[in-house]
Image (cartoon, rainbow, N blue to C red):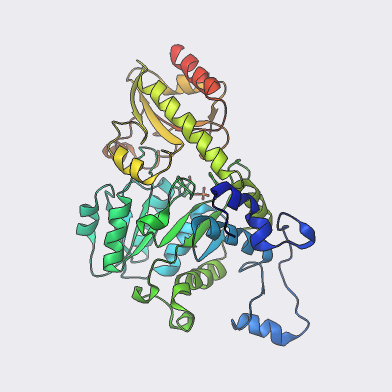
Amino acid sequence: MEFKGFTTKLVHADRLLNQPQDGAVHQPSCNSVLFEYKRVEELVDIFQGRQAGHAYSRQSSGSIDALQNMLSHMEGGIGALTFASGMAAITTSLLSLLKQGDHLILSQFLFGNTNSFAHTLRGFGIEVSLVDVTDVTLVEAAIKPNTRAVYLETIANPVTQVADLAAIGALCAQKGILYMVDNTMTPAYLFDAKEVQASLLVGSLTKYIAGHGHVLGGAVIDTGLYDWTRFPNINPAYQSQPAHLWGLIQIKKKGLRDMGGCLTPQSAHAISVGMETLALRLARSCENAIKLANFLSNHEKVAKVYYPGLCDHPQHQLARQHFKHYGGIMSFDLKPGYDCFAFLNSLKLVLNATHLGDTRTLAIPVAHTIYYEMGAEQRSKMGISDNMIRLSLGIEDIDDIVDDFAKGLDAL
Ligand code: PLP
């Protein structure tokens, strides 16, 4: 398919890549768990990898293949695997690629659940260093002989730090280290992961990609840029296959098949329909975000706004360099003395909810919810005040959003 436009490609991807029967424009969701073969030799060939086909839907099915094709096509990858949630994609990939004695460099600004999972990895004998990934020299200083991967998020939340994406990519390429990038906040329309030499893209489909708060999912996409012969943990049984496929084969067999966190066919279908409008929704959310960020940063009751689109954001230049727009997520601190609960309770349009990347604008008090488990000391080290509110901008009309915030702030 040679269409140039991002949305043109996506809107026609299911129809053209997956070729559903009877002229259907969507690959239907197929509920069969098992697949019958009239001749048992065929089933054996599928098991032994001599023939393509489906044996059992925990590993693969037509509905799941269809979404994986669309995701890989969207990111310009060589293949994708999907999972029951973003966390299933992240944990399954790490657990199937790493082993005891390995060292992993993680961003110190990670999504809370991924950060919490780092403790689980330590329990399995995997060394983990948490590093400030806004500065490549700190990542370089953390590399050890047993470092197997660097893992970061493009734009972190809630404080919106932007990683030194291209410099870290160049460093990983030079050292032969796997570069895992969670691009939940900046799917392909906003960010070209191959330009920064990302090896594996991991993250949530629940957010911008599905987009409507109606389905959970996660994915791993191989960009094809990493030389898997430099990765020492590939099971010898998979090394008879072409080397560019080794990573996904290992994640599929050791992870998806053995750990079982598979996506349902119904969810795959819902995600594939949602993603057709990804660019339209993202563009609108980002446009709303920059307008609201400007409104909030000029408001007398607001102490600070964290948004990469603002000129005083510490990584504004990095964001400008790498992203088409500055994202739909921001946070802000109310000035001390103003009650963030009273403010949130007064909002009429904006929802108090823990999610992001939705069509609706969402707000959440960070210290009391998503960063509560971390404790006050760690929160203060991370610059998270008790009055910080995280926002995910939806696609509503901006005047309604600003009006809701203005009235809420006036009421304080
Ligand atoms: N990665 C990032 C950056 C996230 O923000 C989230 C969830 O908010 C996840 C991963 C996990 O995704 P899911 O909720 O689909 O498990």
- Quadrant (top left/top right/bottom left/bottom right) for the N terminus: bottom right
| Res 355 seen here | no
Q: Is residue 220 in sight in this rendering?
A: yes
Q: For this rendering, which residue is in front, 398 or 203?
A: 398
Placement of 41 over or under 393, stated as above or below: below
When asked about the image quadrant of residue 294, the answer is top left
Number of numbered discs on residues: 0
Q: Position of residue 206 (x, y in %)?
A: 56, 47
Q: Which quadrant of the figure has residue 14?
A: bottom right
**Relative depth, front residue between 13 and 27:** 13
Could you tell me which residue is drawn at 56 percent across and 44 percent down?
Answer: 278
Q: Is residue 74 left or right of residue 44?
A: left
Residue placed farthest to the top in the image?
411
Q: Quadrant of the C terminus?
A: top left
Which residue is rendered at x = 57% and y = 65% of the image? 260
**In the image: residue 108, left or right of residue 401:** left
Q: Name above or below for residue 239 compared with residue 31.
A: below
Q: Residue at x 46, y 20 (%)?
A: 343
Q: Tell me if residue 223 comes above or below residue 135 in the rendering.
A: below
